[in-house]
Image: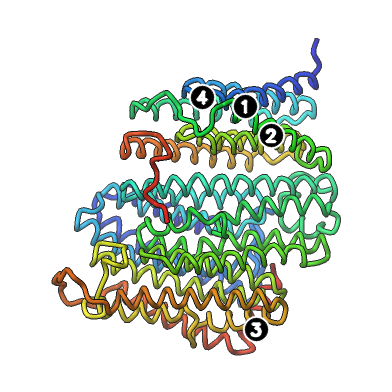
Amino acid sequence: MSIFSALLLLTTVVVYFAQTESQIRRFSVLMSTVTAVSIIGVALLALINKITLSIGGLFKADEFSLLFVILISFCYLTATIVSYRYINVEYGEKIISLNQVRLYFCLLPIFILSMLMTVLADNLGILWIGLEGTTLATTLLVAMYRGDAAIEAAWKYIILCSIGISLGLLGMMIFIYTGVTDAGLFSFTSLSFSSLQNKAEFLNHDTIRYGFIFIFIGLGTKVGFVPMHTWLPDAHSKTPSPISALLSGILLNIALYSILRFKSIVDISLSSEQWTDHIFLAFGVLSVTVASLFLLQQRNYKRMLAYSSIEHMGIMAFAISLGPIGLVAALLHTIAHTLTKPLLFFGAGEILLSYRTTKIEGVRNVMRKLPITGTLTTLGLLMILAVPPSALFTSEFMTLGLGLQQHPWLSSLILISLSIATFSMLHSVITMLYGQENDRKVFPKEKWNITHSVMSVQLILIIITGLLATTPQALQVLNNIAKSI
Amino acid sequence: MMSLTLWSNLFTAGLLMFSLILISKHRLPALIRHFVFASLCLAGLILTNSLIHGDEHEMYVVIGTIIIKVIAIPIIMTNSARRVHASMQLKFYLKPTATYFILAIMLMGIAYMTQLFPVIPFVSSSLIIIGFILMIIRKDLYSQIIGFMTIENGIATFGILSMIGIPLTIEAGILLTLTTGVIIMAILSRQIQEEYATGDTSSLTELTE
């Protein structure tokens, strides 16, 4: 952990002192490749050999957190590679200055480090610092373009997320309080997830319920659950596209992951999953339904993708509420969403670089002007809409199959909402791809670039995951990971 | 001579009183000054509690609280406002009398809830509610920052009064993270005032559905 932290911090320091934009980008890609590949290597080794690493009671790497470490590292690598081109084009067109390029590549490794801290934390305090760190590291990135809308989005983002995470801190303190007073833990050990889990049966039931509500509302703000989601479409649509990809693709999942850690403690304490499942069910259904209605009226394609992320967080929450098999489906959904959503944001970034607008009405005839981006984005869209062989098809099939048995009416509502979302997204994207434009701008013929390579690799991985997800062996692996929570 | 418990009660009362007075302040220097007094009372509360329980490491938290909340944050906010020549007059959605009326009802509700379920102390819950109300009834960026910090004071008070004793390193990390948050908020508030030529949050309407 300390070596990887040092590598990420070194990247920030060197980027800060680099002289030219080219040096900054090259060094960032080099360091992200070294860091991400080595982290993925170590995490895969630990996962295969089923090794649980623990560092001084502060950090712990079990199967669940290792899966997230791999996903974060993969997203870091792909986002940096895409940024190499994206930032270069924006710098070339004088949209951003050298200082903004420096800020971008300095904050990116800190953001990644904060996410790694969050998923590897075995200590409630470190988890909180990591989560708040993700907000602080990305706020200035949301405000990077300095336009009034970008600054407004950044203000909403930092205020709402900081309040949310502060309420989460209050919830965590309530957990610590019951750990000390009811379970007889020392103050330091009561900060540890492992200790709280081991002593969960001694925790006061009412107190822990109270604490969990604060944590759910607080960290749920960061997940983007409706009605605490208002910051999310603004922030995700105003940030540079590779950062939007990280925010939507992995950060939301990490916040959800943090809530799951507390859910397991509450479930052990109450000797039942029913109480927490009801909370996940309510917020899951609400998020899917409201997000699909907002998707219906979207006029901005990046906001459309952000609302789609809220919808997917809702599906995951719904899946989690359905018991152990639902949790396996939620894990599969997490992996697939983390691979798919960044692909769409990378595609959106390419469209933005060419058309210079995020408004759907300003983008027409993409298939003729940007055939490679158009094709890859369309395939990515089909994957996010859970068209087979997307892994999201398997996870949503599992979720709705279970849901129809346990909550037929609510599952039907989700099915209707998903249909609305599918219709809305297809309608918007088809308009962009094939719609005829009024302004006949001349575009040079699109050439294959590094972003297309990254998008292609992601597509291949999504399809492989989708095919693997139908095998009993893969489901068994996911089941083992789910059990490690 | 006053006992430590009495001092602790005095600081708790001071913390609540100064936070309550914050709501009626319509000039930025007065708002910041009352936040400083409230934070000083918080530092005093941590100090007396550490003396009562013989917890030496809390002394560093007292120093940290004074450096960050009493000195650094007020300086950062004042400088940020001066650099953009921000108006010292703060704007309200709701007048103080009406706000106090709503707050009184809410505090009575909290007092009742605290009797029923005494996990979070009354002072702590009240500070969190005061912070929220400050953020809702005010239309300016600085009041939102002070509102956020008041919520944080409420959470810190819970940590002290419930005697859970968070380790120093973690507490230092939390304080440092909060300070970074306030610095970023100050940078953003400066950028907003440069962009919109006002610190009025009701002008932030670019991003509505």
Residue B19, numbered label: 1
Residue at numbered disc 4? B32
Q: Is residue B182 visible?
A: yes
**Residue A461: which quarter of the image?**
bottom left
Residue at numbered disc 3? A401
**Residue A42: which quarter of the image?**
bottom right
Q: Earlier in the sequence, mark 4 or mark 1?
A: 1
**How many callouts does the rendering have?**
4
Instruction: Indicate the chain on which mark 3 is placed.
Output: A
Report whether A28 appears left or right of B78.
left
Residue A35 image offset from top left, x and y in percent: 45, 63
Real-space CA distance between mark 1 and mark 2, rounded to the nearest whole angstrom? 9 Å
Real-space CA distance between mark 2 and mark 4, rounded to the nearest whole angstrom? 19 Å
Real-space CA distance between mark 1 and mark 3, rounded to the nearest whole angstrom? 52 Å
CA neighbours of label 2 inside 10 A, class few (<14), some (14 to 19), many (20+): many
Rendered residue at 21%/76% (across/down): A369
Q: Is residue A34 visible?
A: no
Residue at numbered disc 2? B126
The reply to whether dot 4 and dot 1 touch (C-beta < 8 Å) is no
Where does the N terminus of chain A fall, quadrant-wise?
Answer: bottom right
Q: Is residue B172 above or below residue B83?
A: below
Real-space CA distance between mark 4 and mark 3, rounded to the nearest whole angstrom? 56 Å
Residue A190 image offset from top left, x and y in percent: 75, 49
Q: Is residue B73 above or below residue B173?
A: above
Q: Under tag 3, what secondary structure? A: helix
